[in-house]
Image (spheres, rainbow, N blue to C red):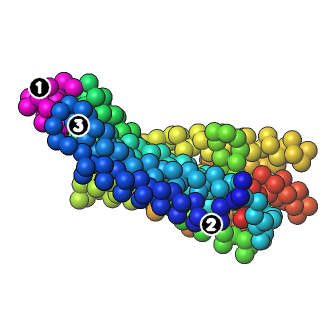
Amino acid sequence: MTELRNGEGLSLVTSAATKGLRYVLILWQSNGTGGSDSMITGLIIQMVVILLPVCALLGAALLHRANRERKKIRRPVSEKLLRPPGETLRRKLEELDERLFLFSSMLLTSTSVAGVMANQELAHSRSIEAVAYHPGVLLLIFISFYSIWKMFRLLKRRIAFLLGLSGELAVGEELNKLMLDGCRVFHDFPGGDDWNIDHIIVAPGGVFAVETKARSKRALLKDQPDHKVEYNGEILIFPDGWTAKPLNQAERNALQLAIFLKKATGEESPVIPVVVLPGWYVTAKPNTRTKVFNPKMVRKLVVESRPVISAAQMQRICFQIEQKCRDVEF
């Protein structure tokens, strides 16, 4: 089978949809107005008119993806790239947007077809009750509300993902400055199927597993600051509540990273868990196992830490981490 060139698949589907729509419109105009057969034919034609553009759009998208995957195109750069900040969240957003498109298409189709069916039933029976209890209309209304419910849940997740991605990008930009001090910085370390480490800093003072938490600020009383968070060594106390989840997550990530480096290098590597809160003024208890900072204060922790690993060990650690983080196609 001859491969389609760029854009040919979309043009082909669009052309077919246009011709089909023109044919359906001709049938619709030539359709009579009397008899039940005429009413059924009119209903079918109206449904086709509504569904054809949606099906054409979905078909074009699927055909374009299949054609792109089938082609053997050589990339200008064959080497995979290092992960940028927030790569995991970016991929999740892509998947979520595809699901949003699916449910929005379902909503558009179900509401349109339900309207057509209700109009035809009303014209035939002249009864609102017949329309209200029509099985097909009820099913399509259920699909419409189900689509709305799913879209609402997906949009809430999308807002949370966008907030997290913005936080990781902001922290990553600040941490990258540490490379001027001789440190190595990696982003979005893929630890497993269900967890990752937002940032890893490798420095003479140790390996720092950084967990970024972007948290929105809420309006409080006029005499209460809404930008300060307190860390007492066990929990994070925000103006509108407290939590220990970021601390526990950072400690788990640091432990898993230490285990990974031990197996990969054969050496013990000191891993320090760090929680970074972009945009917050942090007051923290000193000498805690897990460190909590504003992004701009991380440099002081890293640069002023007492050297505990050699340059050779740093190189071995960076090599193993880089192998895991270098998986982004050009």
On the picture, is 172 further left or further right than 43?
A: right
Is 70 drawn above or below residue 234 in the view shown? below
Instruction: Using the image as rendered, state which of residue 282 and residue 57 is in the foreground.
Output: 57
Instruction: Using the image as rendered, state which of residue 55 and residue 205 is in the foreground.
Output: 55
Whether residue 310 is visible here, answered yes or no, is no
Query: How would you rate the neighbour count of disc 2 (Cα within 10 Å): few for under 14, some for 14-19, many for 20 or more?
Result: few
Q: Are marks 1 and 3 in contact (CB under 8 Å)?
A: no
Query: How would you rate the neighbour count of disc 3 (Cα within 10 Å): few for under 14, some for 14-19, many for 20 or more?
Result: few
Q: Label 2 to label 1, Cα distance in Å?
A: 52 Å
Q: Secondary structure at mark 3?
A: helix
On the picture, is 292 further left or further right than 271?
A: left
Q: Label 3 to label 2, Cα distance in Å?
A: 43 Å
Is 240 drawn above or below residue 281 in the view shown? above
Q: What is the span of residues highlighted in magenta in the rendered image?
A: 117-134
Q: Label 1 to label 3, Cα distance in Å?
A: 23 Å
Q: Which tag is nearer the camera, tag 3 or tag 2? A: 3
Residue pointed to by mark 1: 129
Identified at 26% across, 24% down, the residue is 135
Q: Quadrant of residue 137?
A: top left
Q: Secondary structure at mark 1?
A: helix
Q: Earlier in the sequence, mark 3 or mark 2?
A: 2
Residue pointed to by mark 3: 38
Decide whether the magenta segment is chiefly helix, strand or loop: helix
Query: What percent of the width, then of the height, locates residue 117?
Result: 23, 36
On the picture, is 73 further left or further right than 143?
A: right
Residue pointed to by mark 2: 6
Identity of the amino acid at label 1? Glu
Identified at 24% across, 32% down, the residue is 37
Q: Is residue 197 magenta?
A: no
Q: Earlier in the sequence, mark 1 or mark 3?
A: 3
